[in-house]
Amino acid sequence: MARPTEHGGWGFTLEPVLLAMAVAPSLAGAGLAAVALAVFLARRPLRLLAEDRRSRRWLPRTSIAVRVLAAAAVVAAGGLALAGLRGDPRFWWAAAAALPAAAAQVGADLTRRGRAFLAEAAGAVAMGAAAPAIALAAGWEAGPAFALWAVVAGRALPSILFVRAQVRRSKGQAARPTATHAAHAAAVAALSALAAASVLPWTAAGAVAGLGAWAAFGLGRSPVPTRTLGWTQVAAGLLVVGAVAAGHYLGW
């Protein structure tokens, strides 16, 4: 019931958490990581509950959804309490900044439009706010903290376009690669500007540039099976996390 059916959502939830905890570990950050996971796991039961109430029915799955939502609320409340007691309260800045994207994503879920590009992009951006929130809770300055959010977005948004293009190709449908290439180029440019401003390591731009090259290669050959595509995206996310963490500690 709680396990989301969107496999990419696991990456978009765990990557910002892993990134921030790698470069700004703290007990408060662990609490916020629990909040992020609870919010993610609440998505599917919330959608099912809304569908059942809209249809004026109460099924066994409805009761399970309510219990899962209650458990997620308890975990989220505990994580927020821990962050509030042990962390810098500025983490609320990131939460507030994520509200518009989160509202858009929840609205799309509840109206059965969760598979649309804008809904997926909004969800990835909203969950990415975990990175600056964790960094702020650990006492980071706002600039470097929110730059981590840019890394998450620069990795996630082009990858959504890439995956959607590959899925279309695997179904024999036309898929123009221009948007994927343009998104990678824009992400590399933005991350390079942040690196030049000394709020990000250069390895962030380098990692996303590498993903852009891989996407260009992938779109130029036969599409791979969906399962393979999913695992390669998990590896891509870990690559970015590792590269940024290494650049942070090595001063690159």
Image (cartoon, rainbow, N blue to C red):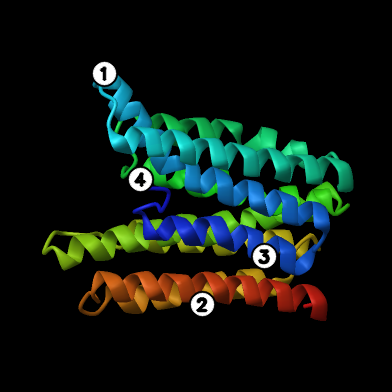
- Residue pushed farthest left? 172
Return the x and y of residue 163 as percentages of the image width and height: 33, 62
110 vs 204, left or right, is left
Numbered badge on residue 81: none
Tag 2 or tag 1, which sits nearer the N-term?
A: 1
Q: Residues within 10 Å of mark 2 (few under 14, many from 20)?
A: some
Please state which of the two labelled residues, at mark 1 or mark 3, is closer to the viewer: 1
Please state which of the two labelled residues, at mark 4 or mark 2, is closer to the viewer: 4
Label pair 2/3, CB-CB below 8 angstroms: no
Q: Amino acid at mark 3?
A: Leu
Q: Amino acid at mark 2?
A: Gly
Q: Residues within 10 Å of mark 4 (few under 14, many from 20)?
A: some
* C-alpha separation, residue under disc 4 versus residue under disc 2: 23 Å
The residue located at (39%, 42%) in the rendering is 44
Numbered badge on residue 117: 4
- The correct choice, above or below, for 197 with respect to 32 in the image is below
Residue 88 placement: quadrant: top right
Return the x and y of residue 249 as percentages of the image width and height: 81, 77
Return the x and y of residue 208 as percentages of the image width and height: 54, 70
Numbered badge on residue 19: 3
Numbered badge on residue 56: 1
Label pair 1/2, CB-CB below 8 angstroms: no
Tag 3 or tag 1, which sits nearer the N-term?
A: 3
Tag 2 or tag 4, which sits nearer the N-term?
A: 4
- The correct choice, above or below, for 222 with respect to 168 in the image is below
Identify residue for label 2: 210
Q: Amino acid at mark 1?
A: Arg
Label pair 1/4, CB-CB below 8 angstroms: no
* C-alpha separation, residue under disc 2 versus residue under disc 3: 18 Å
Secondary structure under badge 3?
A: helix
